[in-house]
Image (spheres, grey):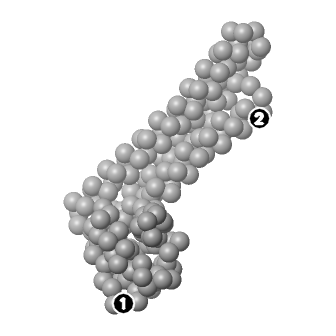
Amino acid sequence: MTEEDLHSVDARMSRAAEAMARNFTTIRTGRASTGLVERLQVEYYGTLTALNQLASLSVPEAHTIVIQPWDRGVLGAIEKAIQKSDLGLTPNSDGTVIRLNIPQLTEERRRDLAKQVHKRVEEARVEIRNHRRDAADDLRKREKDGAIGSDEARRELEHIQALTDRWTDEVDRLGKAKEQEIMEV
């Protein structure tokens, strides 16, 4: 395997961890974060558009998100999108801005969110292992075709396994950090 191939495998594993981390921003914790709503899809003139492209988002207090749309005509559509989402938040509108009050999480809800984190961590691990399997299959095929020797193939497999271990550990670390953030009262 060339250095470029190894870099490609590393990049794909990295993207799996980054996707998981981005997904974590949508999981609620006890405090407000614009990440909860910025990717929320709002129907705007017949097309679905991310909320962060329609309004400015801010967190003036620890338990409040303020959404100020650039076009007042989209205020109702934003409210509908928030109500339809699985956030469990009720929008409060005063005609110019929408305020979302983030209530404290119950212990049961914290456990449910921790389960969501565990599920997403496992999905990322599976994705990383799939990238390892694809690279190993490619190596075995090249070894079978005689393009590389068995010793070189074994060394490359060890290197791919080291990459897999590194990214799996990173995914676990990110998952534990998010779980601690959720369980923090």
Residue lying at 50% horizontally and 55% vertically, measured from the top left: 21
Reading the image, the residue beneath label 2 is 4
Q: What residue type is labelled 2?
A: Glu
- Please count the marks in the image: 2
> Disc 1 or 2, which lies upstream in sequence?
2
* Crowdedness near tag 2: few (<14), some (14–19) or many (≥20) residues, C-alpha within 10 Å: few
- The location of residue 77, given as percent across then percent down, is 37, 74
For label 1, the SS is loop
In the displayed structure image, the side of residue 167 where residue 72 appears, left or right: left
- The location of residue 18, given as percent across then percent down, is 56, 51
In the displayed structure image, the side of residue 11 where residue 130 appears, left or right: left
Q: Nearer the viewer, residue 98 or 112?
A: 98
The answer to the question of whether label 1 and label 2 lie on touching residues, with beta carbons closer than 8 A, is: no
Reading the image, the residue beneath label 1 is 95
Does residue 35 appear anywhere in the picture? no
Does residue 145 appear anywhere in the picture? yes
For label 2, the SS is helix
- The location of residue 88, given as percent across then percent down, is 27, 67
The CA distance from mark 1 to mark 2 is: 55 Å
Of the residues tagged 1 and 2, which is closer to the observer?
A: 1
Q: What residue type is labelled 1?
A: Gly
Residue lying at 27% horizontally and 56% vertically, measured from the top left: 111
Q: Which of 124 and 179 is in front in this view?
A: 124
Query: Where is residue 146, by image quadrant?
Result: top right
